[in-house]
Image: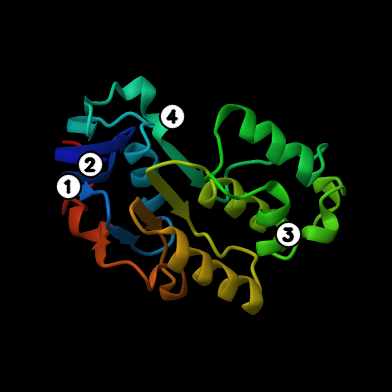
Amino acid sequence: MTISLSDTGKRYNREWIFRGLSYEFTIGNAYAITGPNGSGKSTLLQVLAGAVAHSEGKISWTNAAGIIDPDQVYKQLSIAGPYLDLIEEMTALEFLQFHQSFKPFLPGFSIDDMLERVGLQNALNKQIRFYSSGMKQRIKLIQAIFSDTTLLLLDEPCSNLDASGISMYQALMEEFSQNRLVIVSSNDPQEYGFCQEKLSILDWKPVAKKIR
Protein backbone atom coordinates (compact mmCIF):
# COMPACT_ATOMS: atom_id res chain seq x y z
CA MET A 1 0.00 0.00 0.00
CA THR A 2 1.02 3.60 -0.64
CA ILE A 3 -0.55 6.73 0.83
CA SER A 4 0.12 9.85 -1.22
CA LEU A 5 -0.60 13.38 0.00
CA SER A 6 -0.37 16.50 -2.14
CA ASP A 7 -0.65 19.93 -0.50
CA THR A 8 -2.96 18.32 2.04
CA GLY A 9 -4.30 20.30 4.96
CA LYS A 10 -6.77 19.92 7.80
CA ARG A 11 -8.43 22.65 9.78
CA TYR A 12 -10.99 22.84 12.55
CA ASN A 13 -13.04 26.02 12.52
CA ARG A 14 -10.52 28.76 11.70
CA GLU A 15 -7.35 26.97 12.84
CA TRP A 16 -5.12 24.87 10.62
CA ILE A 17 -3.89 21.66 12.25
CA PHE A 18 -1.46 21.11 9.36
CA ARG A 19 -1.21 22.53 5.86
CA GLY A 20 0.76 22.02 2.65
CA LEU A 21 1.70 18.43 3.44
CA SER A 22 3.06 16.60 0.39
CA TYR A 23 4.49 13.21 1.23
CA GLU A 24 4.35 9.54 0.25
CA PHE A 25 4.12 6.70 2.74
CA THR A 26 5.08 3.35 1.20
CA ILE A 27 4.69 -0.25 2.27
CA GLY A 28 7.76 -1.90 3.78
CA ASN A 29 8.62 1.20 5.78
CA ALA A 30 7.80 2.46 9.27
CA TYR A 31 7.18 6.16 9.89
CA ALA A 32 6.96 8.20 13.09
CA ILE A 33 4.80 11.32 13.30
CA THR A 34 6.22 13.37 16.14
CA GLY A 35 5.32 16.62 17.85
CA PRO A 36 4.24 18.03 21.23
CA ASN A 37 0.99 17.07 22.90
CA GLY A 38 -1.92 18.78 21.22
CA SER A 39 -0.01 19.50 18.02
CA GLY A 40 -2.32 17.41 15.81
CA LYS A 41 -0.48 14.09 15.49
CA SER A 42 -3.63 12.07 16.14
CA THR A 43 -5.62 14.17 13.67
CA LEU A 44 -3.06 13.50 10.94
CA LEU A 45 -3.11 9.77 11.73
CA GLN A 46 -6.90 9.71 11.39
CA VAL A 47 -6.70 11.59 8.08
CA LEU A 48 -4.25 8.93 6.86
CA ALA A 49 -6.74 6.28 7.97
CA GLY A 50 -9.51 7.93 5.98
CA ALA A 51 -11.52 8.33 9.17
CA VAL A 52 -11.30 12.15 9.16
CA ALA A 53 -11.75 14.18 5.97
CA HIS A 54 -8.98 16.55 4.93
CA SER A 55 -9.85 20.20 4.28
CA GLU A 56 -7.71 20.90 1.21
CA GLY A 57 -5.32 19.22 -1.17
CA LYS A 58 -5.39 15.56 -2.11
CA ILE A 59 -4.88 12.18 -0.49
CA SER A 60 -4.96 8.79 -2.21
CA TRP A 61 -4.47 5.18 -1.21
CA THR A 62 -3.17 2.62 -3.69
CA ASN A 63 -2.10 -1.01 -3.67
CA ALA A 64 -1.05 -3.54 -6.28
CA ALA A 65 -4.61 -3.63 -7.63
CA GLY A 66 -4.74 0.15 -8.12
CA ILE A 67 -6.50 3.03 -6.39
CA ILE A 68 -8.44 2.13 -3.24
CA ASP A 69 -11.87 3.70 -2.80
CA PRO A 70 -11.62 6.00 0.25
CA ASP A 71 -14.71 4.31 1.70
CA GLN A 72 -12.91 0.96 1.54
CA VAL A 73 -9.60 1.96 3.12
CA TYR A 74 -10.72 0.67 6.53
CA LYS A 75 -10.56 -2.87 5.18
CA GLN A 76 -6.83 -2.49 4.63
CA LEU A 77 -5.88 -1.10 8.05
CA SER A 78 -5.80 -1.79 11.75
CA ILE A 79 -5.36 0.88 14.40
CA ALA A 80 -4.77 1.27 18.12
CA GLY A 81 -5.26 4.56 19.93
CA PRO A 82 -6.21 5.94 23.36
CA TYR A 83 -9.53 7.24 21.98
CA LEU A 84 -10.67 3.81 20.72
CA ASP A 85 -12.87 1.93 23.15
CA LEU A 86 -13.05 -1.78 23.89
CA ILE A 87 -16.31 -3.66 24.46
CA GLU A 88 -15.77 -4.01 28.18
CA GLU A 89 -18.75 -6.30 28.83
CA MET A 90 -16.98 -8.97 26.77
CA THR A 91 -14.15 -11.16 27.92
CA ALA A 92 -10.85 -10.89 26.05
CA LEU A 93 -11.66 -14.14 24.26
CA GLU A 94 -15.11 -12.92 23.21
CA PHE A 95 -13.80 -9.54 22.08
CA LEU A 96 -11.04 -11.01 19.93
CA GLN A 97 -13.43 -13.60 18.44
CA PHE A 98 -15.83 -10.78 17.57
CA HIS A 99 -13.01 -8.73 16.03
CA GLN A 100 -11.85 -11.75 14.04
CA SER A 101 -15.32 -12.18 12.56
CA PHE A 102 -14.89 -9.04 10.42
CA LYS A 103 -11.10 -8.59 10.31
CA PRO A 104 -9.07 -11.83 10.22
CA PHE A 105 -5.89 -12.20 12.21
CA LEU A 106 -2.52 -13.11 10.74
CA PRO A 107 -2.42 -16.75 9.67
CA GLY A 108 -0.81 -19.21 12.05
CA PHE A 109 -1.77 -17.39 15.27
CA SER A 110 -4.63 -18.49 17.50
CA ILE A 111 -6.25 -16.16 20.00
CA ASP A 112 -4.60 -18.20 22.77
CA ASP A 113 -1.23 -17.62 21.10
CA MET A 114 -1.79 -13.86 20.90
CA LEU A 115 -2.90 -13.55 24.51
CA GLU A 116 0.12 -15.54 25.63
CA ARG A 117 2.42 -13.21 23.69
CA VAL A 118 1.18 -10.25 25.74
CA GLY A 119 0.95 -12.10 29.07
CA LEU A 120 -2.86 -12.30 29.26
CA GLN A 121 -3.31 -16.03 28.79
CA ASN A 122 -4.69 -16.38 32.33
CA ALA A 123 -7.24 -13.59 31.85
CA LEU A 124 -8.90 -14.66 28.61
CA ASN A 125 -12.26 -15.39 30.32
CA LYS A 126 -12.23 -12.26 32.46
CA GLN A 127 -14.45 -9.36 31.43
CA ILE A 128 -12.39 -6.50 30.05
CA ARG A 129 -14.08 -4.03 32.42
CA PHE A 130 -12.12 -5.69 35.22
CA TYR A 131 -8.80 -5.24 33.43
CA SER A 132 -6.23 -2.67 34.50
CA SER A 133 -5.45 0.15 32.07
CA GLY A 134 -2.25 -1.62 31.06
CA MET A 135 -4.07 -4.87 30.35
CA LYS A 136 -6.61 -3.00 28.21
CA GLN A 137 -3.77 -1.47 26.21
CA ARG A 138 -2.34 -4.92 25.57
CA ILE A 139 -5.70 -6.00 24.13
CA LYS A 140 -5.75 -2.93 21.87
CA LEU A 141 -2.28 -3.80 20.62
CA ILE A 142 -3.27 -7.42 19.95
CA GLN A 143 -6.26 -6.50 17.79
CA ALA A 144 -4.16 -4.02 15.80
CA ILE A 145 -0.80 -5.75 15.40
CA PHE A 146 -2.16 -9.26 14.79
CA SER A 147 -4.83 -8.19 12.29
CA ASP A 148 -4.00 -9.35 8.77
CA THR A 149 -3.64 -5.84 7.33
CA THR A 150 -1.06 -4.04 5.24
CA LEU A 151 -1.51 -0.67 7.01
CA LEU A 152 -0.85 -0.53 10.75
CA LEU A 153 -1.54 2.74 12.57
CA LEU A 154 -0.46 3.18 16.19
CA ASP A 155 -1.25 6.23 18.30
CA GLU A 156 0.74 6.43 21.54
CA PRO A 157 0.99 2.62 21.59
CA CYS A 158 2.71 2.37 24.99
CA SER A 159 0.06 4.34 26.87
CA ASN A 160 -0.44 2.81 30.34
CA LEU A 161 2.24 0.16 29.77
CA ASP A 162 4.90 -0.55 32.37
CA ALA A 163 8.51 -1.38 31.52
CA SER A 164 7.73 -5.02 30.74
CA GLY A 165 4.81 -3.93 28.54
CA ILE A 166 7.03 -1.53 26.61
CA SER A 167 9.58 -4.30 26.01
CA MET A 168 6.75 -6.57 24.87
CA TYR A 169 5.54 -3.91 22.40
CA GLN A 170 9.04 -3.37 21.03
CA ALA A 171 9.51 -7.11 20.51
CA LEU A 172 6.18 -7.36 18.69
CA MET A 173 7.07 -4.49 16.40
CA GLU A 174 10.45 -6.00 15.59
CA GLU A 175 8.64 -9.16 14.51
CA PHE A 176 5.44 -7.87 12.93
CA SER A 177 6.30 -4.53 11.30
CA GLN A 178 7.92 -6.16 8.29
CA ASN A 179 6.18 -6.07 4.88
CA ARG A 180 3.63 -3.56 6.13
CA LEU A 181 3.16 0.17 6.11
CA VAL A 182 3.48 1.21 9.76
CA ILE A 183 2.81 4.74 11.01
CA VAL A 184 3.29 5.62 14.68
CA SER A 185 2.03 8.86 16.23
CA SER A 186 4.12 9.61 19.30
CA ASN A 187 6.53 11.95 21.06
CA ASP A 188 8.22 9.07 22.92
CA PRO A 189 11.27 7.44 21.25
CA GLN A 190 10.47 4.18 23.06
CA GLU A 191 7.39 3.91 20.86
CA TYR A 192 8.92 4.78 17.50
CA GLY A 193 12.59 3.83 17.79
CA PHE A 194 12.20 1.15 15.11
CA CYS A 195 10.87 3.63 12.53
CA GLN A 196 13.15 4.44 9.60
CA GLU A 197 11.50 7.78 8.85
CA LYS A 198 10.56 10.54 11.30
CA LEU A 199 8.27 13.46 10.47
CA SER A 200 7.54 16.39 12.77
CA ILE A 201 4.03 17.74 12.31
CA LEU A 202 5.41 21.14 13.29
CA ASP A 203 7.01 21.30 9.83
CA TRP A 204 3.51 21.68 8.38
CA LYS A 205 2.14 24.18 10.87
CA PRO A 206 1.35 27.46 9.07
CA VAL A 207 3.06 30.55 10.46
CA ALA A 208 -0.36 32.18 10.56
CA LYS A 209 -2.58 29.53 12.05
CA LYS A 210 -5.82 31.43 11.56
CA ILE A 211 -7.61 31.63 8.23
CA ARG A 212 -7.63 35.20 7.08
In this orientation, does residue 140 appear? Answer: yes
Q: What element carries label 1?
A: strand
Which label was assigned to residue 75?
4
Tags 3 and 1 touching, CB below 8 Å: no
Horizontal placement of 21 versus 111: left or right?
A: left
Disc 1 or 4, which lies upstream in sequence?
Answer: 1
User: Can you give x and y, in whole percent of width and height, for residue 104 in the image?
Assistant: 55, 35
Disc 3 or 1, which lies upstream in sequence?
Answer: 1
Which label was assigned to residue 97?
none
Q: Which residue has dot 1 on it? A: 24
Disc 3 or 2, which lies upstream in sequence?
Answer: 2
Tags 1 and 2 touching, CB below 8 Å: yes
Residue kind at label 2, given as amino acid type: Thr
Q: What element carries label 4?
A: helix
In which quadrant is the C terminus drawn? top left
In this orientation, does residue 51 appear? Answer: no
Q: Is mark 2 on a helix, strand or loop?
A: strand
Q: Which residue has dot 2 on it? A: 2
Few, some or many residues within 10 Å of mark 4 (<14, 14–19, 20+): few
